[in-house]
Image: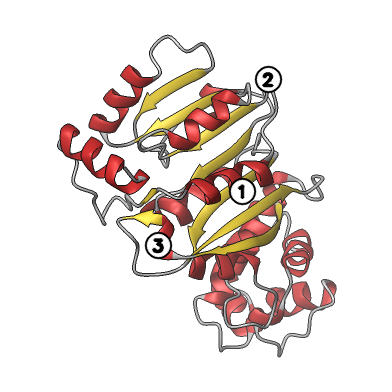
Amino acid sequence: MSRASELRDLLASLGVHPSRRLGQNFLVDGNLLEALVRDADPQPGQTILEVGPGSGILTEELLAAGAQVTAIELDHRLADYLGRRFAGHPGLRLIQGDACRADYAALFGSEPFRCIANLPYSCSSPFLARLADLDNAPLDLHVLLQREMADRLAAGPGTPDYGAITVRLQLRYSVRVLRTVPAQVFWPPPEVASAYVRFVRLAEPYPPARRRRAGELAGVVFAQRRKQAARLLARHLGNADLAHLALRSAGLPPEARGEVFSPADFARLAACLENQ
């Protein structure tokens, strides 16, 4: 029996019908699973966050590698099943809940942790933005994402895919698309291609308040990306002279559009507006 057939039988026994709203697309390709684990290279004793463990095939591999896994599953039926499947396993902490609302400070404190997951498409953007904003952000992430989202997060300035979420993530991480993943490796297959993406945390180059202000400024200029940054910032700050002064101080031309500013440019701009 194929993995897809086994999964269908399991979900039917649990009364689970895969939900597009919840982004429930289950990985069923064993070769890809092995490749993903090999790329992520979980090590004994490492603390790993897994979001959307589903039927537990990735969870099993992480535990077999000796990792300490915190798995967060929104669907209570799948969480109940995982609780039975891995009952008594000392390496697993299973939480039934919403990963976008979890208290990661309470879960991990200052302990270094990684994230390895087949992320539900429905929550990937807010989840990644939330993790990147944590004081104790993951050291790295190896995650399956919708290809369109992966392209956005890895994009460079001046490209169509570059946007505010790109800036927010790249202020904290280097982002690399490792491989494109076809829809056929999931059941049910999504309507779009996926990608496996690696995020590696940068040595902290900016104070947290500056990084967050830089993300806020990126949101301002990308809200109307075809307009001059100076006009948008002047409206946001309520002071045109201050907007022009900050841009010049950051070495950025006021007539430019914000879509050409790099994450480092936004950080310099934020620094010039500190105490304002």
User: In this orientation, which residue lies closer to the viewer: 263 or 202?
Assistant: 202
Residue 171 - label = none
Q: Dot 2: what SS?
A: loop
Q: Dot 1: what SS?
A: helix
Question: Disc 3 designates what residue?
Answer: 184
Disc 3 packing (10 Å; few <14; some 14–19; many ≥20): some
State whether residue 157 appears in this view: yes
**Looking at the image, residue 253 lies above or below residue 129:** below
Kind of residue indicated by mark 1: Ala
Question: Disc 2 designates what residue?
Answer: 45
**Looking at the image, residue 160 lies above or below residue 163:** below
> In the rendered view, does 139 fall on the left or right side of 13?
right
Q: Nearer the viewer, mark 2 or mark 1?
A: 1
Query: Where is residue 155 shown, x and y percent of the image?
Result: 65, 72
- Whichever of callouts 3 and 2 sits on the residue coming sooner in the sequence is 2
Query: Where is residue 130 shown, x and y percent of the image?
Result: 52, 46
Query: Where is residue 10 shown, x and y percent of the image?
Result: 24, 35
Question: Disc 1 designates what residue?
Answer: 35
Query: Distance between the Cα atoms at labels 3 and 2?
Result: 33 Å
> In the rendered view, does 88 fall on the left or right side of 5?
right
> In the rendered view, does 173 fall on the left or right side of 72?
right
Kind of residue indicated by mark 2: Gly
- Whichever of callouts 3 and 1 sits on the residue coming sooner in the sequence is 1
> In the rendered view, does 253 fall on the left or right side of 14?
right
Disc 1 packing (10 Å; few <14; some 14–19; many ≥20): few
Q: How many marks?
A: 3
Q: Nearer the viewer, mark 3 or mark 2?
A: 3
Query: Distance between the Cα atoms at labels 2 and 1?
Result: 21 Å
- At 60% from the left and 64% from the top, the residue drawn is 153
